[in-house]
Amino acid sequence: PGPGPGPGPGPPPTPTTDNLTAPQTPMASGLQARFRRSIDQGLFYDAEQACRTVYHRLCKSGKHPDALAALLDGARQLLAARQVNSGTALAIMAAGHMSDPENGSPYAEEGRGWLRELVGAYPTDPASTEEAAEWGREKLGFVRAAIKWSQAKGGPEYGDEEMNAVAGRLCAVGKDYPAAQKHFLRSNDPAAHAEAVIAWAEEEGMRSEVDLFMVRTILRYLVTANLADANVVYTAFVAKYGPGFSPLANFADMLLQTLERENAYPLMLKLQEAYQPSLARDPALASYLGKVATAFYNVQPAQPGGLFGGLMGDMMRGFMGPPTSSS
């Protein structure tokens, strides 16, 4: 759906009962009624504040699962009412509560389901391009909070792959392609990544630079030995521009085939030598290729300047001290 995650199993139930409709205490009952009344009357700021008050009082009483359920339910209802700012505020609070070291939720399918449900609750029919941009920014803020939860509570080092894919798509829609690429490289959606890079190349690059956008992206996958996703990117570019659309595209094709083979480092070196004029178009490619050789063939990159250049460089860095922020 839209920029949200792809189809998957339905979300698990909320952690407890619907805390905004099932009063816990006489004191809370009035706040829950206020929330419902505010929603019905279109007083959405009042509804958000009522939900916050319920949450804090439940936390103070030690009822942390109920407090989380209150935030999740309040966020869903406000998003359903197209109140994206208020709904996002409660959604980010929920992700923050889940990240709490003592009372949070571990990284598991249950918690992922709660957050996935909130991603899907965002409205998808903005009334204007300005509203679309605002909704996108708000949604991205929540998704990044969800990524932080996954990092804090036992998930992947760079965050949940599905949420990174959502963030990548949102950044791409907002034309922030560098940020989109960062999220996509940490995601499970190389096809969407390739689509975003193609759009990036066509909007901000020249036609002669399309192959550079492709190869840079492929190498970013290969430095982590992710050959499968690198091939997805290559296939997407070939589908768009045709096979062999440039010498650098031919190099990418042969490099991907070479890396399928064991002990093929000498062949990789010959390939780089043969395509040196094309690779020289971007000096950074040589550094990436050195990292690719390390990832696939355990070849350590050479120190610039050889042995004495490396030693002298270390000595000079020690003499000069660490770089400052203005360096």
Image: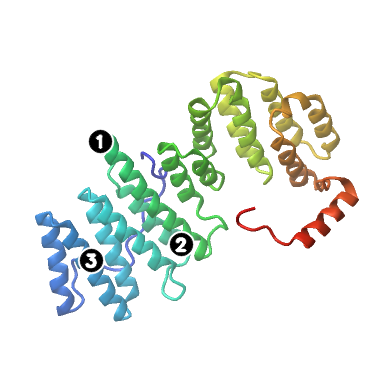
Q: Residue at x 63, y 19 (%)?
A: 243
**Comes first in the chain, label 3 or label 2:** 3
* Left or right of residue 219: residue 98: left
Describe residue 21's horizontal placement relative to residue 157 as left or right: left
Residue toward you, 38 or 206: 206
Give the residue at the far right of this rendering.
308
Give residue 260's mark: none
Question: Disc 3 versus disc 2: distance between alpha carbons?
Answer: 21 Å
The kind of residue on which mark 3 rests is Cys
Sequence order check: which comes first, mark 1 or mark 2? 1
**x%, y% of residue 232?**
59, 33
Is 104 above or below relative to 317? Answer: below
Residue 206 in the image: x percent, y percent? 55, 23
Please give the residue where the numbered disc 1 appears in the rendered image: 128
> Which residue bears the numbered disc 3?
51
Quick one: SS at disc 2? helix
**Nearer to the camera, 59 or 181:** 181
Judging by the rendered image, the residue that carries numbered circle 2 is 149
Q: Which amino acid, by three-letter code, is at mark 1?
A: Ser
Circle 3 SS class: helix
Q: Nearer the viewer, mark 3 or mark 1?
A: 1
User: Residue 194 occupies which quadrant of the picture?
Assistant: top right
Q: Is residue 122 left or right of residue 213?
A: left
Quick one: label 1, few (<14), some, or many (20+) residues within 10 Å? Answer: few
Task: Please state which amino acid type lies under the numbered disc 2.
Answer: Trp
Crowding at mark 3 (Cα within 10 Å: few <14, some 14-19, many 20+) = many
Residue 168 % position (x, y): 47, 43
Q: Secondary structure at mark 1?
A: loop
Q: Quadrant of the N terminus?
A: top left
Q: CA distance from mark 3 to mark 1?
A: 29 Å
